[in-house]
Amino acid sequence: MRASIALALGVGLLASTALVSTALAQSDKDLKPGDWPRYARDLGGTHYSPLNQITAANVGKLQTAWSFKVRPEGGGSIVSSATPIVVDGVLYLPVGNAVVAMDGATGRELWRHPVTGGLARRLVTYWPGDKDHAPRIFYSNGKAISALDAKSGQPVTSFGDNGEILLDVPYNSPPTVYRNVLAIGANVAEDPVGPAGDSRAFDAITGKKLWQFHTVPQPGEAGHDSWLDDGWKGRSGANVWNWWMTVDDKTGTLFMPVGGPSPNYDGSGRPGPNLFGNSVVAVDAETGKLKWWFQTIHHDLWDSDLPAPPTLYDAKVGGKTVHALSATGKTGLMYILDRDTGKPVFGVDEKPVAKGDVPGEWYSPTQPIPVKPAPVSRKTWTPADVVTADDTTPEHAAACRKLMQDYGGTFFNSGAFTPYFMHTDGGPLKASINLPMNGGSLWGGTAVDPRNGMLFINSSEGGSIGYMEKRKPGVNYGRGDEHSTQTYDRANLSGPGAYQSFSASIKDASGKTVNMPCIKPPWGRLIAINGNTGDVAWQIPLGVSENLPAGKQNTGLYNGNGSPIVTASGLLFIGATADKRFRAFNAKSGKELWETKLDYPAEDTPITYTGKDGRQYVAVVAAGPGGPRLPNGRPANAESLVVFALPK
């Protein structure tokens, strides 16, 4: 069987699919300036707030207004940090075993709904209701989507089966709400064969299923011929695992960031480009009908998902308005596309890439590389990029060079999409290094100021080293998959597993063990890109390494678990880094204007809103290990919501 490679590479557009009339009601048209009702505030995922009470002139006066201990030290199970939403001054927050509503100005608890059968993580979503139905809060415990009355916190028993709809395939996050549509992704295991990663949608009033989109195209569907040798059959993965999606409320288009097909590193059983893996997929939000797609990786062999949905904005290009979107992911590349067609705004080249030697593997001869913008994280490596004593410390530099010597003195790198090579026990070692490691940009996504098209993104640096080997029976390769049926998997000198970072652990002056990347700093950056031209406006290191000597601490840090927000007063707020700082920057210049140190890292996206008292607040969740360990030996997390405001 031969695939139509022209179909699978780059943009696919169904010309017969008419765009929804722009006369449709816009779900964001009634969005109040002081509300933050979604993860990224609006349907377009801009992370932008029109509030301007806090300015560059007074941001230095911010102080803690109130805080809420989500989970005390040493107590409860470990759940990921969450991002609250705010509507009409009421703040809603999932806290694992409950969903809580609070007064956004004081933190006073208004109601608490216990969650059973699983945990409510990351986010809840809000449906504004209609003339016959009161507003609702939706959450997921992983197995079901549940509806609560937004005012009382009581289950809405008319939704689904007594207030919930059971899911045939798990999804650990709440639905994306557009009009009366609840859109969800899927959380599937990383085994080659298993449940489909299809996206689904339900009615917000009744819970009735509206549509299901095949993320691995079935026979007769567009993209099906990008799977050779029946590799599509029973294929798992290719799922939207993120907890939010974006929607163009003028055209009714839902944009899905689809991750890679399973398994992550062995594609020998799925030859071909593998649509819709690693693609931005645009569908009609109300019907699920395909409009277009753009694939960012053909035949993913790196687990380089699109973790964040695209950010929507209008660009001014050559004197014309372009309905644009910005899509970023673990590769550290940013794709700026026309969101009506999926075509690149500033060009994308299909560039030849290196080929590996894993038996039976299918290697794409080219991969899509944007002409603009430049990568938001480094893609190439040479031995000259290894840290020196002048960069960090003699001990760290020596440990990094020893690690390199353990791998034979160097690594293979061919730039973007460097392949991994086969290794057999006792045979010669050829390890590859891929940059970035664990994502240039992760699930928080990009912020944009819709007034001027300036894009703001935080990115992380580092190297991932390893090789491929034939799987050993009964061995866990890092994902609890010792019974997987795949043939090959990634490994490294530390043992079987997903990856080994090119980093080294040393003791700092206090005797604490710290792990630092072995490539030269910066290890994390905050970047502004002109979305009208694709040019970088400014970039700065984000985060400090306090364990290093004075004068060497401005290294930037890994920051993959959070993202920036931008306000009408020209401020950027971001946590994201492990140095426990929460910071504000001048959006025009990148100059730091304010910072505060929290008890734990603010490793999620902040929000800003207006309380019932008329004051502007900025809130972020900070989480980290603290207190005694849990019975299973893992450190117990402490987690707090911290809220800031100007003095009264």
Image: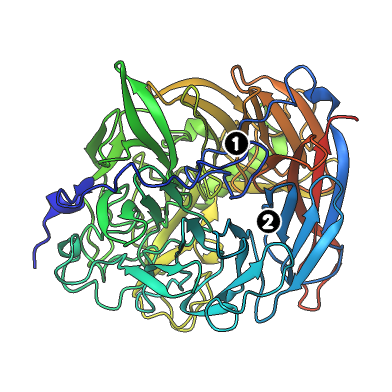
Contact? badges 2 and 1 (CB < 8 Å): no
Q: Residue 225 carries which label?
A: none
Residue nearest the viewer, comparing 307 with 251: 251
Residue with the most extreme right position:
648
Q: Which residue is drawn at 53% across and 67% down?
A: 495
- Residue 198 picture quarter: bottom left
Is residue 82 in view?
yes
Q: Going 48% across and 74% down the picture, which residue do you hit? A: 207
Would residue 209 appear left or right of 41 to someone viewing this image?
left
Please name whichever residue, 538 or 69, is drawn nearer the observer in this view of the structure.
69
Query: Label for residue 82?
Result: 2
Q: Which of marks 2 and 1 is nearer the N terminus?
A: 2
Q: Residue at x 64, y 59 (%)?
A: 122
Q: How many angstroms separate mark 2 from mark 1 (CA)?
A: 25 Å
| Label 1: which secondary element | loop
523 vs 22, left or right, is right
Q: Which element type, helix, strand or loop, lies under badge 2?
A: loop
Please say if 157 is above or below 391: below
Residue extending furthest toward the left: 1
- Reply above or below: 26 against 317: below
Which residue is label 1 attached to?
Answer: 523
Q: Which amino acid does label 2 sit on?
A: Ala
Three-letter amino acid code of the residue under disc 1: Trp
Number of the front mark, 2 or 1: 2
- The residue nearer to you, when weighing 434 against 256, is 256
